[in-house]
Amino acid sequence: MDESLGGYKLKVKYDGYFKIINKGTKQKYCLGRQRTLYLDPLEMHASTLALICLLLLLKCAIGEDPYRFFDWTITYGDINPLGTKQQGILINGKFPGPDIYSQTNDNLIINVHNNLPEPFLISWQNSWQDGVYGTNCPIPPGKNFTYHLHLKDQIGSYFYFPSLAFHKAAGGFGAIRILSRPMIPVPFPEPAGDFTVLIGDWYKANHKNLQARLDRGRRLPPPNGILINGRGSNGVSFTVDQGRKTYRLRISNVGLESSLNIRIDGHKMKLVEVEGTHTVQNVYDSLDVHVGQSLSVLVTADQPVKDYYIAVSTRFTKQVLTTTAVLHYNNSKQPASGPPPGGPTDDINWSLNQAHSFQTNLTASGPRPNPQGSYHYGSINVTRTIRLASSAARVDGKLRYAVNSISFVDPDTPLKLADHYQIDGVFTLGSITDYPTGATMRMETPVMDSDFHAFVELVFENSESFLHSWHLDGYSMFVVGMDRGQWSSNSRKNYNLLDAVPRCTVQVYPQSWTAVYVALDNVGMWNLRSEYWSRRYLGQQFYLRVYTPSNSTRDELPMPDNALLCGRATGKTSYL
């Protein structure tokens, strides 16, 4: 790529480092963490050259956060994860998509080429580039869009996925790992290896057929199987060296609707991180990972040299689906044998007690040097309580799902754009209440209004007979309580106000509730949704508008110059 700077021609090489080289003398003017810029001398005065070099040296001294560049092409292609050829969504020909390796404060520049015959969106983070339809216009067929994501003050294990239509059932997902900066201490020794483990339920049916079934108002059937890194039973292995070496497994449930349990034959798992929070390092034989959740464990290769099953199975389902991968000891000649390790009891209390055991490591550093426990969320006054109840009903003869009796309908214009340009009639501000009313379900495009810097208590109430999973974009939520039965103000007596784990996706058990605290310090239009994808698709979601009258870039990033405009925002200017 060539750029122009004061009469010099810049050759930009996207390798993550920043060098300024006089092509004639090969002299390096500076070196720092940035992209590589090569200058070809043209005819110019020495004073101009000196000024350019001075400016670029100052840029090096300032130390702008590093850049990482990605170029992705989205296509359909044949996949065969469960023994039946089907159409999958590939990224650069891969299923699942490529891992994103990054570090705190990195700038990710991701150029996405949509070669599908329909619009496409990928969900990540950031007020203007969150990657859901309430925030972004889709990438049209045959077009590309470049995302700029700044991983400001973030660490941990996450994943990206396609958010439009029912694309998530076809692939297009992959892992995101954000490493700590070298000067920030991590509360465990550097592992000998770092593995991505994407687990999720899977259908053999084409994603468009699944979507059509939902459009007809019918529930999805149970999934056909479980995948690990896009493969069926024993389709993937993880190689370790024997000798008490420790390995990190970053586990994410990327599926559509099944809570899963993971365990490793003959090995314990030490929990060390949950969605960007270093945890108290408890040891488990198996772990429940609910839809949309991510966590990291350490596993020590201290057993005899052979292969061992890694088993993943569904939780709280009539038919238990199980799949396996292999933990392969280097130089092993003995394959995994015998039945895979069995899962835990289906007693809800077992899973609930495990969830209660997750605690924040208060003395460990997060993305910054200060301890995670230095933020005393339990001493902040709650300014608003919002109770959210899920429900299912038929509207005009078709199945719909709702939050507080409102079933979400996609608008003709992304809500973020409608709010920015003050376009009337796209959404109804305040139409969703702060508490369940028991009213008849109705279909709208609701947006809940909230104030910047408010400190909110969210209570998710589940009166249904199966487990729910809820996600809030743009935030981590302190999981202060969860229990069986009906929530009441007396439930606060048992809240964890000291070391609750903040995370972006929380489970709510059947006939139970989960309470979280959220500091609304991130201006934007944020999707709060069921992670059960059929329920989200059929209306179990809404948007939380975190508003400030300030136009400061300290509160919210400006609209990107390359923002896609669609619907009633078509033809507007992106710099307003």
Image (spheres, rainbow, N blue to C red):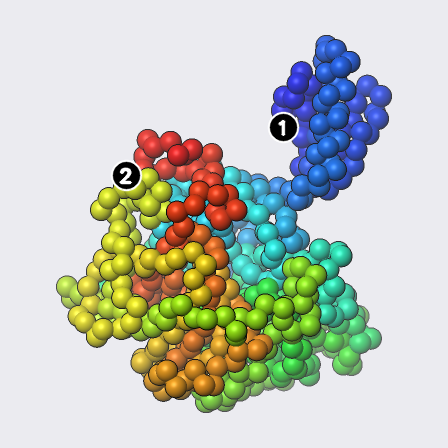
Calculate the distance from the C-alpha at mark 2 to the C-alpha at mark 1: 35 Å
Can see residue 45? Answer: yes
Q: Please, is residue 533 above or below residue 32 in the view? A: below
Work out whether 44 lies above or below 179.
above
Picture coordinates of residue 373 (x, y %)?
63, 71
- The answer to whether 451 appears left or right of 19 in the picture is left
Judging by the rendered image, the residue that carries numbered circle 2 is: 568
Point 39% across, 52% down: residue: 547
Tell me residue 411's x, y (percent). Answer: 27, 49
Label 2 CA crowd tier, 10 Å (few <14, some 14–19, many 20+): some
Q: Which residue is mark 1?
A: 1
Report the front residue among 186 and 373. Answer: 373
Q: Amino acid at mark 2?
A: Arg
**Mark 2 or mark 1: which is in front?**
2
Of the image marks 2 and 1, the number of the one nearer the N terminus:
1
Quadrant placement of the N terminus:
top right
Helix, strand or loop at mark 2: helix
Q: Is residue 463 above or below residue 231?
A: below
At numbered mark 1, what does the secondary structure look like: helix, strand or loop?
A: loop
Closer-to-camera residue (538/17): 17
Q: Depth check: 341 or 527 in front?
A: 527
Residue depicted at 59% across the width and 45% down the height: 108
Residue count near mark 1 (Cα–Cα under 10 Å), binned few <14, some 14–19, many ≥20? few
* In the displayed structure image, the side of residue 211 where residue 257 appears, left or right: right
Q: Which label sits on residue 159?
A: none
**Residue occupying image coordinates x 68% and y 24%:** 10
Q: Is residue 167 visible?
A: no
Q: Amino acid at mark 1?
A: Met
Q: Quadrant of the C terminus?
A: top left
